[in-house]
Image: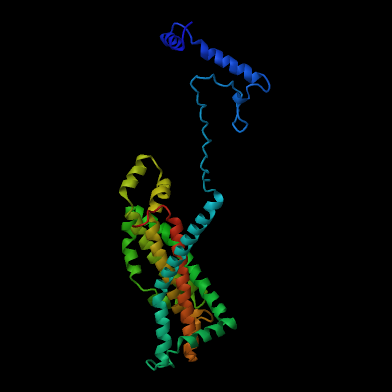
Amino acid sequence: MTTGTDTTALAAAGLTAPAEPARAGAAIRKAAAVPGGAAGLAPAPSEPTTGTAPAAAGAPARKAPARKAPAQKAPAQKAPGRNAQAPASGRARAATGARAVVRVLKAIGLRSAAILALIALWEIAPRAGLVDATFLPPVSEVAVAWWELAGDGQLAEHAQASLIRSFGGFGIAVAVAVPLGLLIGWYRPLADFLGPLLEVFRNTAALALLPVFVLLLGIGETSKVSIVVYACVWPVLLNTISAVRNADPTLIRLARSMDLSTPRLFQKVILPASVPAVFTGIRLAGAVSILVLVAAEMIGAKAGLGYLINASQYNFAIPQMYAGIVTISAIGVGFNQLLVTVERRLSLWRVPAA
C-alpha cells in the first residue's frame, strides 16, 4: 500500500496518476446526482450555477472568461444638410445684395453731387439777392412753369417737333458719314482726292451757313433738317476715317494671309476695331444735332423747343424760357446715355481697362 506522499511523488514524476483525487471527484459527482445526498456539497442557492460540471476537488479552479461590456458608440454627428445650409447661403446672398446696393447708391450720390449743388445754388442765389430774380428766377419757379407747360400739352408738342427734326437729321448724317468714312479711310486715292474739300467744309460753322440753307431750301422743315445733317456729318465722318486708319496692321496682315475678301475683312477686323472711335463721333453728333436745331428753330419756326425759348423771351416769360432750356438739357443727357448703352453692347469684345 502506497502512502499519499509516494503517490504524489509518482504523479509528479509522470509515472502514474494520483488515485485519491480521482476517487474523491467520482464520489462528489455521485453525491450530487443522488437527491438529498451530500447536501453539504451542493451549491448554495445564492451562488449562480452554470451548465458546466462542478470542478474536481483539489483541481485548480478555472476562471471563467470575463465578458466585455459592449462598447457604446458615440452618437454620429449628422452632416449639415440643405436645411442647415439654406440660412447661411441666404444670409450670404443678402449681404452681397446689400453691398451691391450700397455701391450703387454711392456711385449715384457721387455723380449727382455736382448737379444737386448747382440746383441748390440756383435756388439760393436769387432768394438771397445775389442775382436779380427777374432774370434768373429760383429753380422752384422754373419747376412750376415746367409743370404747367407739361400739363397743358405745350411742352410735349414742342418737344415732339424738335425730336423729329433732330433725330431725322442725325440718322441721315450717320447713314451717310459712316460708309463714306470707311471708304475714305481705306482707299488712299479717294482720301487724297476729297481731303482738301473736306478740310474746307469742316472748318465752316453750320450756323454760318444757316441763311444759305434758308435761301436755297426755304423756311420750312427741309432747311432745318438739312442744317442738322450738315452739322452732324463732320464728327462722325472724321472719327470714322481716323478709326480705319488706326486699325491694327498686324490684324489686317493676318486676315489677308487667311485670304479674306475685302467685305469679310471689313466685317471681321475693320468694323470691330472702329466701333469705339465711331461711337465717339456719333455721340458728339448727337449733342450737335440738338444744339444746331434749337438755333435753327429760332428762325422762322412755329413749333419746337427753340421756338418756345425764343417766344418766351419775347413775351418776358422767363420761367417758361428756362423750362425749355432744362428740357433740351434733359433730352441731350438721355440721348447720350442711350448711345453709350448701344456702344457697350457693340463693344463686348473689348477687354475692360484695369
Q: Quadrant of the C terminus?
A: bottom left
Q: Nearer the viewer, residue 256 or 117?
A: 117
User: Taking 55 as reference, is 281 above or below it?
Assistant: below
* Rendering coords of residue 349 (x, y %): 41, 52
**Residue 50 falls in which quadrant of the image?**
top right
* Rendering coords of residue 94 (x, y %): 50, 61
**Residue 337 falls in which quadrant of the image?**
bottom left
Q: Nearer the viewer, residue 52 or 274?
A: 52
User: Taking 174 as reference, is 80 above or below it?
Assistant: above
Q: Nearer the viewer, residue 325 or 198?
A: 325
Q: Is residue 125 among the parts visible in the rendering?
A: yes
* Rendering coords of residue 28 (x, y %): 59, 18
**Residue 25 falls in which quadrant of the image?**
top right
- Residue at x 33% of width, y 59% of height: 242
* Rendering coords of residue 291 (x, y %): 43, 75
Relative horizontal placement of residue 152, taking residue 114 as reference (left or right): right
